[in-house]
Image: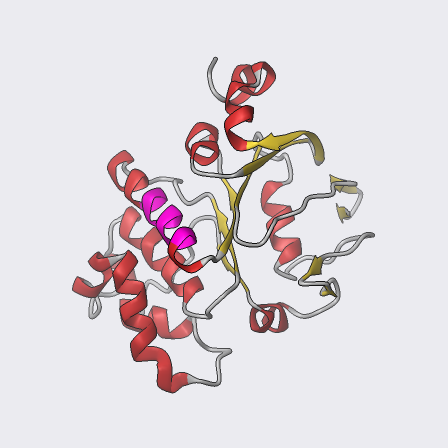
Amino acid sequence: MYVNYGAIKAIRGINIQVKEGSIVTLIGANGAGKTTTLRTISGLIKPASGKVIYCNEDITNLSADKIVQRGISQSPEGRLIFSNLTVLENLEMGAYTRKDKYKLKDDLEFIFHFFPRLKERLKQYGGTLSGGEQQMLAISRALMSKPKLLLLDEPSLGIAPLLVKTIFEQIVKLNRETGITVLIVEQNAYLALQNSNYGYVLETGELIIEGDAKELIQNEEVKKAYLGG
């Protein structure tokens, strides 16, 4: 797949696979093309060439809302919650494409199983939450569309270390208990790989290394460039 921003070649012929039921992480320096990759999968950006295949269907030219309806949802970098809406209203916004609104009460309980703190904050405005709580809300909002594939863009960004640990624990728990497939973009390479099955390393829009996540942690090139080794 190739993705351009005008004359800038942001993605240069990458080919990644995310196996159903797995957690896959995509690491790389700023400007490597990680977020662009997620936004292309989500339909927010259209590739210059190449295809996005999901469940044996070519979704490359589908609109973003149709892609959500197919079962792909994204928690964006910077969280981008609605600060002037309550936690409950933010969660309800995550279900805007669904036709089975009568099931939302059950789905809220599903969310609270993983992020119980949100139940305590239901009537608070999103903008009054801590950074970690806002990240929980952003992930939960994405989950309200009942995705099969969850895209997480920098879930640890700007969050206290203790809450980062909690969030990653819940991502793993979510994957194990529900089978939801997760693709993570993350600058905290060690944390992401430690909690993933497989990993890809992007450098200036190109894939340079891929493999089992635990093996990548031991890879000398990865350790030197991304793990402080």
The x and y percentages for residue 79 are 41, 53
Here the colouring is secondary structure
Decide which of 208, 10 is in the foreground and name it: 208
The x and y percentages for residue 141 are 39, 64
Of helix, strand and loop, which mostly describes the magenta segment?
Answer: helix
Q: Quadrant of residue 116?
A: bottom left
Report the side of 151 relative to 109 (left or right). right
Residue 42 vertical placement versus 108 (above, below)? above
Residue 209 vertical placement versus 174 (above, below)? above
Decide which of 125, 221 is in the foreground and name it: 221
Report the side of 182 relative to 90 (left or right). right
Task: Tell me the magenta residue range.
Answer: 167-176
Residue at figure coordinates x 27%, y 70% from the top left: 109
- Is residue 86 at least partly visible in the picture? no
Asked if residue 131 lies in the magenta stretch, the reply is no
Asked if residue 171 lies in the magenta stretch, the reply is yes
- Is residue 161 at least partly visible in the picture? yes
Report the side of 150 relative to 158 (left or right). right
